[in-house]
């Protein structure tokens, strides 16, 4: 199990995915900061989570303050709130790894792939936040309810980013969630995972699956022996 000591700030940590990630990482001993548009809501969510995870270090703050104190910042807000959220945190994230889990779902047809015309959401985030921020994309295809369950999760997480060292940092965090993270190439490749979420939503509905995920088959060689 990797030894990750970074404080993780989860922007949108009161939502389903953000809350699930906070729960699992807190249980693994990672210091957590829950961010929300409402500081009061974040504080309440932190207190509720602390009551469920003995000995956990969990703080609730408004999004901007959460981004300022986190070593790693996870963005789990709905696509409709992304632009406003980036404006909030932009001045607080220089020199940090930002993990984007945004999926460009456009209601009411969330089961239909509707990608932005200007490319992957993660690439847009990298442009907005600037060169001093290293953006990694992950967690697009993980059902939030699975994160609230006990034990290993039968799901792989595709991890995209332009720097191998940052992808590996996120993969180490994924291991603490009892899932497998996989190097999936540069940030531009994240469009595949963003699109796949709508496909999984359709599968869930058609086959009545409670949170379908993905699994990569085959014997994988350790990333330490491969190139970037």
Image (cartoon, rainbow, N blue to C red):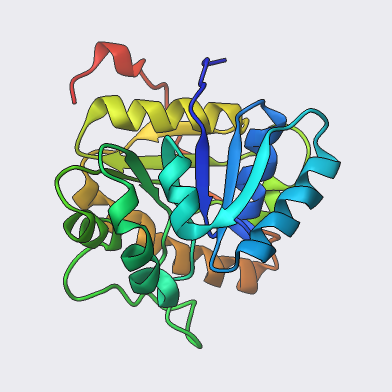
Figure quadrant of residue 50: top right
In the displayed structure, 224 sits above or below 177; it is above
Q: Is residue 73 left or right of residue 190?
A: right
Q: Would residue 214 be seen by someone viewing this image from the given angle?
A: no
Figure quadrant of residue 36: bottom right
Q: Position of residue 177 (x, y in %)?
A: 61, 33
Total labels drawn: 0
Figure quadrant of residue 152: top right
Residue at horizontal 65 percent and vertical 53 percent from the top: 19
Q: Is residue 71 left or right of residue 32?
A: left
Residue at horizontal 40 percent and vertical 66 percent from the top: 85
Which quadrant: the C terminus?
Answer: top left
Residue at horizontal 67 percent and vertical 40 percent from the top: 58
Q: Nearer the viewer, residue 198 or 81?
A: 81
Q: Nearer the viewer, residue 80 or 89?
A: 89
Q: Is residue 3 left or right of residue 82?
A: right
Q: Nearer the viewer, residue 80 or 85?
A: 85
Q: Position of residue 99 (x, y in %)?
A: 39, 46
In the displayed structure, 47 sits above or below 206; it is above
In the displayed structure, 172 sits above or below 20; it is above
Residue at the extreme bottom: 108
Q: Is residue 71 left or right of residue 62?
A: left
Q: Position of residue 31 (x, y in %)?
A: 60, 32
Which quadrant: the N terminus?
Answer: top right
Residue at horizontal 77 percent and vertical 46 percent from the top: 49
Q: Would residue 77 be seen by someone viewing this image from the given angle?
A: yes
């Amino acid at each position: 199990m990797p030894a990750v000591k970074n404080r993780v700030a989860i922007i949108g940590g009161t939502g389903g995915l953000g809350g699930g990630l906070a729960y699992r990482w807190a249980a693994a001993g990672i210091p957590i900061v829950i961010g929300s548009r409402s500081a009061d809501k974040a504080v309440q969510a932190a207190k509720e989570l602390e009551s469920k995870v003995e000995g956990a270090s969990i703080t609730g703050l408004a999004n901007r303050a959460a981004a300022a104190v986190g070593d790693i910042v996870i963005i789990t807000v709905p696509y409709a709130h992304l632009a406003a959220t980036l404006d909030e945190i932009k001045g607080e994230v220089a020199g940090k790894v930002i993990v984007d889990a945004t999926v460009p779902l456009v209601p009411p047809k969330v089961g239909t792939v509707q990608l932005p015309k200007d490319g992957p959401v993660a690439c847009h985030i990298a442009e907005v936040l600037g060169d001093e921020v290293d953006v990694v994309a992950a967690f697009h295809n993980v059902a939030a309810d699975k994160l609230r369950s006990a034990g290993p999760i039968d799901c792989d997480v595709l991890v995209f980013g332009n720097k191998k060292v940052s992808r590996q940092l996120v993969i180490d965090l994924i291991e603490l969630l009892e899932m497998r993270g996989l190097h999936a190439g540069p940030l531009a490749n994240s469009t595949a995972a963003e699109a796949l979420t709508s496909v999984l939503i359709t599968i869930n509905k058609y086959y009545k699956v409670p949170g379908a995920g993905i699994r990569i088959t085959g014997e994988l060689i350790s990333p330490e022996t491969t190139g970037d």
